[in-house]
Amino acid sequence: MLGNFTFCNPTRLYFGEGAIKNLKDELEKYGPTVMLVYGGGSIKKNGIYDAVVSVLKECGKKIVEDGGVMPNPTSKKLEEGARIARENNVDLILAVGGGSVCDYSKAVSVSAYCGEDPWEKYYIRFEEPTCKIIPVGCVLTMVGTGSEMNGGAVITNHEQKLKIGHVFGSDVFPKFSVLDPAYTYTLPRYQMVAGFYDIMSHILEQYFSGEDDNTSDYLSEGLLRSLIHSSLIAVENPRDYEARSNIMWTATWALNTLIAQGKTTDWEVHMLGQAVGAYTDATHGMTLAAVSMAYYRHILPYGLKKFARYAVNVWGVNAEGKSDEQVANEGLAAMEAWMNKIGLVMNLKDLGVTEDIIEGIADATLIMQGGYKVLTREEVVEILKASL
Ligand code: NZQ
Ligand code: ZN
């Protein structure tokens, strides 16, 4: 049965080549001071910085820059951003970058006026914002996280060796996002395919939970098939607009709350991946890829019917004359072959994990309740070791 829900996604999207032309209309809705947030400099090399700044100038905005947002943004950087936003009394935060820049901007938006340590408030105590929230807009340059249309903001605390996501409510969703698939052409291949797997994982985290017959799971299967199809084209030709635009759209729908409505979700792969990230600072999508096969093979017996359905509906496995177990395993084998083909990192060693930090990673792994098997700590260690 599909459970009851309220669905509202307030983010306005501008999608397609040249979508930046819509930025002007959005900027006009806000006051004079814009905090321009970006990462380590890719946007200065590929021209996106110039394109955005020229629109900001055209609109007569005062620009307050906050660059240098690192992949996996830190709590320390968040404090700096919150101070910049507060001291300059900014009217809009404009995030130009990938998930890290978008997440960071949302975290700054709720931290500038929170009056205390935002890490403690939002990431340890998981409280909701009660202060003024600065509006955020995004110009997306990297596809995967879905941050452009959701309330997620993942922050890493290196001192505490924790990487934690807070999923904020619709007040914190970007007010608008500009999605131009061509803006992602300059991504290094490693980042591009890590993003592809992030999308895959978001869908699977919501799909592999519950046994009800619901529309969300059918939507998920469609999104997965589109992603698999387009990813194989994009790795051959990263400038294939059709493939890149389909993938960009799939990423947004994979994590804009739609496919989670009315059903339970898992998210254990993300908890494992984030703990690995806290210890290694590795690329998010690769941390997920490295632990996924061991995790899914471990929980397969507990969700056998769904894994068999996945094999048939997503991977086209022929079920005739085979047991559910056989079919389910063939589905996972097909998934693993696809992962290898697009060039994902398939083990934790390649991300810098060594035996001696496994226990620490296990301690940093939150245990979720919605998957087919609630893991014990021993099982977490077992899965991490099997992923080495
Ligand atoms: O920093 P710059 O120089 O811009 O380079 C970035 C960065 O090195 C580069 N890049 C981005 N766009 C580019 C480009 N390089 C060339 N051309 C372009 N067009 O790519 C690198 C990675 O960027 P990043 O933003 O870190 O990647 P991603 O989008 O994967 O974001 C990862 C962060 O998002 C969080 C992750 O945990 C991680 O902290 N997540 C956020 C979620 C959410 N909001 O719902 C959910 C996800 O599960 C995820 O946890
Ligand atoms: Zn993710």
Image (cartoon, grey):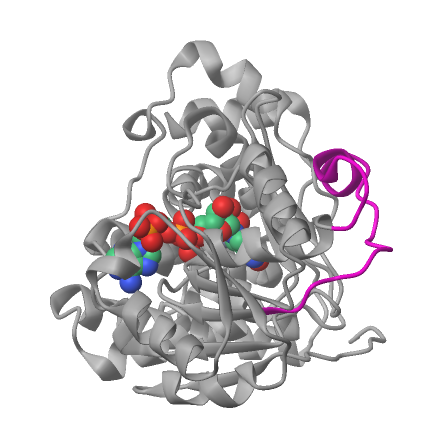
Q: Residue at the spot x=66%, y=23% of the render?
A: 377
- Quarter of the image with the C terminus is top left
Front-most of 225 and 80? 80
Q: Position of residue 38 (x, y in %)?
A: 41, 55
Give the quadrant of residue 16: bottom left
| Residue range of the region highlighted in magenta in the rendering | 113-136
Q: Is residue 170 magenta?
A: no
Q: Position of residue 78 (x, y in %)?
A: 59, 41
Q: Tell me if residue 334 can be seen.
A: no
Give the quadrant of residue 354: top left
Q: Is residue 115 magenta?
A: yes
Q: Tell me if residue 2 can be seen.
A: yes
Q: Is residue 135 above or below residue 378?
A: below
Q: Residue at the spot x=31%, y=77% of the render?
A: 181
Left or right, residue 250 beside residue 217: left
Q: Residue at the spot x=29%, y=60% of the render?
A: 43
Left or right, residue 209 beside residue 343: right
Pick out the residue farthest to the left.
Answer: 236
Q: Position of residue 65 (x, y in %)?
A: 46, 55
Q: Residue at the spot x=28%, y=29% of the render?
A: 350
- Quarter of the image with the N terminus is bottom right
Left or right, residue 85 beside residue 114: left
Front-most of 95 and 164? 95
Q: Is residue 379 above or below residue 180?
A: above
How many numbered dots are placed on residues in this image? 0
Q: Position of residue 319 (x, y in %)?
A: 41, 68
Q: Is residue 295 above or below residue 357?
A: below
Q: Main secondary structure of the magenta part?
A: loop
